[in-house]
Image (spheres, grey):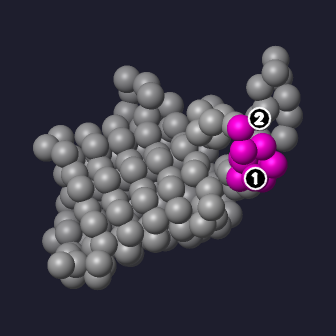
Amino acid sequence: RTETLGEMYYYNMNDAITTAEMNKRKDAELTDADFIVYATRDFEAAYDLSIDADSRIYLDLKGFVVETGEKVTNNNYFKIYNSEDSQATLKPSISIDNKGTLDIEDTLVKVTTDTNTINNSGNLNLKNTTVEGTTKYGVHNGNNSKLTLDSDSVIKADSNYGLHNTSN
């Protein structure tokens, strides 16, 4: 990591998320706004990313393309959004596993391999977001899970159904 003009920059997203989680545990007075991880360029997150069961993490893609080379697992609260006018894209190569609450706003989420884009066993909320699968599902919505999407969101797949729902 490096610090420039009071801002901390990390060389990988996993370090940024881990540091945010540790800082929140140390200082309960910090607000959720203190735990926003900002993308500063297009990049690949080559490591497993896991949001702990007691963490709330916010990822602002800021119009960049972020590729994840390993598994992304949310165990509590994870918000992925785009605060810029330009298109932001998240390209997971392995399914995003949501076991908590996952909010995605103003983002294209497009898997790059033959896997479901998002496996949801928690609460998945999509706002002005497109989730694309390839040969598997865009979203697999598992038992007792909840999926909410606004009228500006789309779930699709190239050669399969966009949504596979086994929830009640």
Closer to the camera, 8 or 158? 8
Where is 76 relative to 30, above or below? below
Dot 2, how many residues are within 10 Å of its Cα: few (below 14), some (14-19), or many (20+)?
some
Of helix, strand and loop, which mostly describes the magenta segment?
A: helix
Estimate the spatial distance between the alpha carbons at disc 1 and disc 2, rounded to whole Å: 20 Å
Q: Where is residue 164 drawn, in percent x and y?
A: 21, 75
**Residue under the point 42% across and 44% down:** 89
Question: Which of the two discs, 1 and 2, labels the residue nearer the N terminus?
Answer: 2
Kindly indicate the quadrant of the structure image that contains residue 69: bottom right
Side of 57 where 86 appears, left or right: left
**Residue under the point 46% across and 46% down:** 80
Kindly indicate the quadrant of the structure image that contains residue 151: top left
Q: What residue did someone put label 2 on? A: 9
Callout 1: helix, strand or loop?
helix
Q: Where is residue 44 drawn, in percent x and y?
A: 61, 52
Q: Which residues are magenta?
A: 19-29
The circle drawn on residue 125 is none
Q: What residue did someone put label 1 on? A: 25
Instruction: Tell me, yes or no, whether the highlighted magenta stretch contains residue 28.
Output: yes
Q: Where is residue 56 drawn, in percent x and y?
A: 57, 51
Specify the quadrant that holds the N terminus. Answer: top right
Side of 112 where 34 appears, left or right: right
Specify the quadrant that holds the C terminus. Answer: bottom left
Side of 38 where 157 appears, left or right: left
Where is 156 relative to 10, above or below? below
Q: Are marks 1 and 2 in contact (CB under 8 Å)?
A: no
Name the residue at the front extreme. 29
